[in-house]
Image: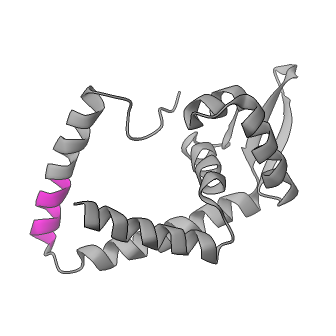
């Protein structure tokens, strides 16, 4: 299992490099994308979800905003609050990395039949649910 994880991690790192992203940049884009449309959230919630200090996040958001991947704007309901959002370029960059990852996973699973893929999906769902019982969800929670 560890060798498969390492293999997919190497593929992910290669995809990130092809698209000029660092892992922490991808994770921020991923969190914003997982929030659902309009792909925005408060910086505090983003920092909590990423497990980073708000000051660290501010520096990272500055970099992503300079690269044109995110925006920071006042919340419409409270002008004192800020929202971090994906730009079209940020969404496209995230999608390109996801496409590369999807291709790597498809290549890895290509030897399996449709029936075997179904069994694998069922078994992985059981394992994922068991892991989530003992810890945080594997996917971000969308409010």
Is any part of residue 42 visible from this angle?
A: no
Residue 98 or residue 23, whichever sits in front: 23
Residue 61 or residue 38, whichever sits in front: 61
For image coordinates 64% across by 61% down, the residue present is: 22
Judge whether 18 appears above or below 28 on screen.
below
For image coordinates 76% across by 46% down, the residue present is: 60
Q: How many marks?
A: 0
Residue span colored magenta: 114-122
For image coordinates 24% across by 73% down, the residue present is: 109
Judge whether 28 appears above or below 107 on screen.
above
Q: x, y (%) of residue 88?
A: 74, 59
64 relative position to 104: left or right: right
For image coordinates 71% across by 59% down, the residue present is: 90
Hey, which quadrant is residue 77 in on the image? top right
Check if residue 120 falls in the magenta segment.
yes
54 relative position to 121: left or right: right
Judge whether 109 appears above or below 91 on screen.
below
Q: x, y (%) of residue 54?
A: 73, 30
Hey, which quadrant is residue 128 in on the image? top left
Check if residue 124 falls in the magenta segment.
no
Q: x, y (%) of residue 118?
A: 15, 61
Looking at the rendering, in which quadrant would you find the N terminus?
bottom left
75 relative position to 54: left or right: right
Residue 77 or residue 53, whichever sits in front: 53
Is any part of residue 134 visible from this angle?
A: yes
Q: x, y (%) of residue 16?
A: 59, 68
Q: Main secondary structure of the magenta part?
A: helix
């Amino acid at each position: 299992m560890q060798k498969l994880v390492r293999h997919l991690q190497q593929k992910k790192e290669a995809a990130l490099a092809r698209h000029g992203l660092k892992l922490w940049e991808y994770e921020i884009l991923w969190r914003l994308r997982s929030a659902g449309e309009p792909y925005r959230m408060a910086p505090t919630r983003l920092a909590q979800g990423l497990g980073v200090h708000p000051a660290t996040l501010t520096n990272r958001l500055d970099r992503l905003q300079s690269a044109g991947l995110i925006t920071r704007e006042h919340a419409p309901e409270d002008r004192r609050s800020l929202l971090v959002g994906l730009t079209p370029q940020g969404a496209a960059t995230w999608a390109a990395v996801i496409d590369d990852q999807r291709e790597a996973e498809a290549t890895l699973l290509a030897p399996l039949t449709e029936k075997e893929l179904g069994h694998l999906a069922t078994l992985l769902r059981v394992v994922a649910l068991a892991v989530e019982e003992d810890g945080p969800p594997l996917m971000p929670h969308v409010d």
